[in-house]
Amino acid sequence: MSTKARRFVSVAFLGGALLGAALLGSRASSSTPADTDFHKTYPRTPGASGAFAGVALDKLSFPGLTLTDREDHTVDEGGIVLAYSQGNDVRLVVKVAVAPDSARARDFVDVELHGVQSVLPAAVDPAFGDYAFADDGGRGDAFAVGALGNIAWSVRVDRDAPSMPRASTVMAALRANAVPGAPTYPTVHVSLPNEVRVSGADITVSSSLTAKLRAEGAYVAVGPRLRPFGPGPVSVVAQVVDDLGRVASARASATAK
């Protein structure tokens, strides 16, 4: 494989790619000519039975690499992104999405495939998934993506760096840490007062896990309190993730006056 073909996608690029993934995902149900051509290129394989509760992410480790960054997103927003570094350079990026069903997991794979410039052959190793593709003739050298039942994952490796694992090795680690069972998601609830003043309003969050908060039309201050930028629509989103990579979110909206 050429150096150009192996060009590594940095975390900064993947941050932008998540937005593109969301846009592509929102068009998944359309029947444009581009979608038709895509599904001719990557025909769906027969659905697989069985389900997975998630993936034990804390057990993932790779010699010579350190987990230096992590972003948690729901399946529709691109899944969980794990960045592993060698020194100051990101060398391995892993995405994991625990979906409620196999259809949503395969949608995740389709979004990932839309971001690949060349057509990938089907994966040779069935451990990659029941709907899976990889470079290097399907063997998985620098890139592999797949869905196994209701879970999906993708792997990008900078194979031009010394002592880097093959994508196939990383995929094997993911498969080894997949936990059978029902994908039961954590619960989270968030609410705002009926009346939100520009001076701010308390945010009420209920969950057994620590929630991360983000706001729209406002910012989250200590309290936690929602501080609107001015009169108008405001929202707060609470997100939680458990140790098997199951992400749940809740939203509350109001109008600041």
Image: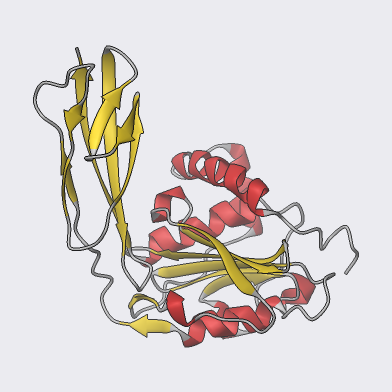
Q: Nearer the viewer, residue 110 or 208?
A: 208
Q: Nearer the viewer, residue 92 or 257?
A: 257
Residue name at image x 75 percent, y 52 percent: 117
Instruction: State the image quarter where residue 170 is shown.
Output: bottom right
Q: Nearer the viewer, residue 189 or 1?
A: 189
Instruction: State the image quarter where residue 116 is shown.
Output: bottom right
Q: Residue 27 appears at what percent x and percent y?
A: 48, 39
Residue name at image x 28 percent, y 26 percent: 227
Q: What is the tally of numbered marks visible in this picture?
A: 0
**Residue lying farthest front?**
222
Residue name at image x 28 percent, y 71 percent: 183
Residue 56 lies, with reference to residue 209, above or below; the image says below
**Residue lying farthest bottom?**
176
Q: Nearer the viewer, residue 113 or 166?
A: 166
Q: Residue 45 appears at what percent x and percent y?
A: 52, 70
Instruction: State the image quarter where residue 167 is shown.
Output: bottom right
Residue name at image x 22 percent, y 40 percent: 223
Residue 23 lies, with reference to residue 76, above or below; the image says above
Instruction: Decide if residue 50 is in sight here.
Output: yes
Residue 50 lies, with reference to residue 191, above or below; the image says below
Q: Residue 66 appears at what percent x and percent y?
A: 62, 73
**Residue lying farthest right?**
2
Instruction: Decide if residue 124 is in sight here.
Output: no
Left or right placement of residue 63 versus residue 251 in this view: right
Left or right placement of residue 157 versus residue 246 in this view: right
Q: Residue 229 appears at what percent x and percent y?
A: 34, 18
Image quarter hosting the N terminus: bottom right
Image quarter hosting the C terminus: top left
Color encoding of the figure: secondary structure
